[in-house]
Image (cartoon, grey):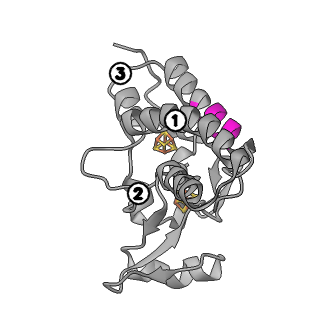
Amino acid sequence: MVERSELDNGNKLCMQCGMCCTGRVFDRVEVTDPGNITYLENAGFKLEKDDKGNPHFSLPCVAHRSNCCAVYENRPSVCAKFRCNLLERYLAGEIGFDLAIKIVEECKQLASELEKIEYYGATPQEKIVSARLSELHKKILEENNPGLRRAYAAVAIRAFALNKTIEANFKRAGKGASASTPASA
Ligand code: SF4
Ligand code: SF4
């Protein structure tokens, strides 16, 4: 059992992570509390409705600044309730803080390397890794561009590693990639 301060309820880990607010894990957050809509709009959130009329906003989140949530007290309940696998394992004492942070840093490093690669970096930032990889693949099929093919190889290696780590650590069973539920940061 990993020893952990009783006061540390996971905020320490989330404040050094923020992956679920960046758009790298999920692509949107559903706003299920109607009373929160006006507050969020006034705070600069662009709310859209899906085909069932449910409001949501796209990630990366406009309120995610320096790994903190700028609307913490009024964040959507979906955000407040979300715990990724990594956080659950940390809170259960199954994994220590240093290892949890190492996993977070490895993900951030891979994501940062990906975003510097030409073509990948040019795809829309709000798309999660797998969607951006599919978009690149589609471009390859459509364009006869050797530079694009070379970039795809560099992207694919990192994207597959990143996706594997994200699936294992930051998603939870039953959560789809488009039904986003980021955590408090
Ligand atoms: S819930 Fe998980 S992904 Fe979100 S900030 Fe906390 S540790 Fe990171
Ligand atoms: S917790 Fe929710 S509202 Fe706050 S920064 Fe993350 S996605 Fe945005």
Q: Do the residues labelled 2 and 1 touch (CB within 8 Å)?
A: no
Residue drawn at the location 64% of the way across and 35% of the way down: 154
Residue drawn at the location 56% of the way across and 48% of the way down: 185
Secondary structure beneath dot 1 equals helix
What's the magenta region? 107-114
Quarter, ligand 2: bottom right
| Residue positioned most to the left | 174
Q: How far apart are marks 2 and 3 (CA)?
A: 23 Å
Evaluate whether residue 161 shows in this view: yes
Evaluate whether residue 9 shows in this view: no
Main SS class of the magenta portion in the image: helix
Q: Residues within 10 Å of mark 1 (few under 14, many from 20)?
A: many
Q: Which of 142 and 182 is in front in this view?
A: 142
The reply to whether the magenta stretch includes residue 41 is no
Q: In which quarter of the image is the N terminus?
A: top left
Secondary structure beneath dot 3 equals loop
Residue drawn at the location 53% of the way across and 52% of the way down: 137
Mark sitting earlier along the chain (2/3): 3
Residue bearing mark 1: 162
Mark sitting earlier along the chain (2/1): 1
As drawn, 12 above or below 149: above
- Cβ of mark 2 under 8 A from ligand 2: no
Residue 94: where, in percent of width, then height? 34, 20
Residue 183: where, in percent of width, then height? 46, 51
Residue drawn at the location 38% of the way across and 51% of the way down: 82
Residue 180: where, in percent of width, then height? 41, 59
The reply to whether the magenta stretch includes residue 109 is yes
Residue bearing mark 3: 93
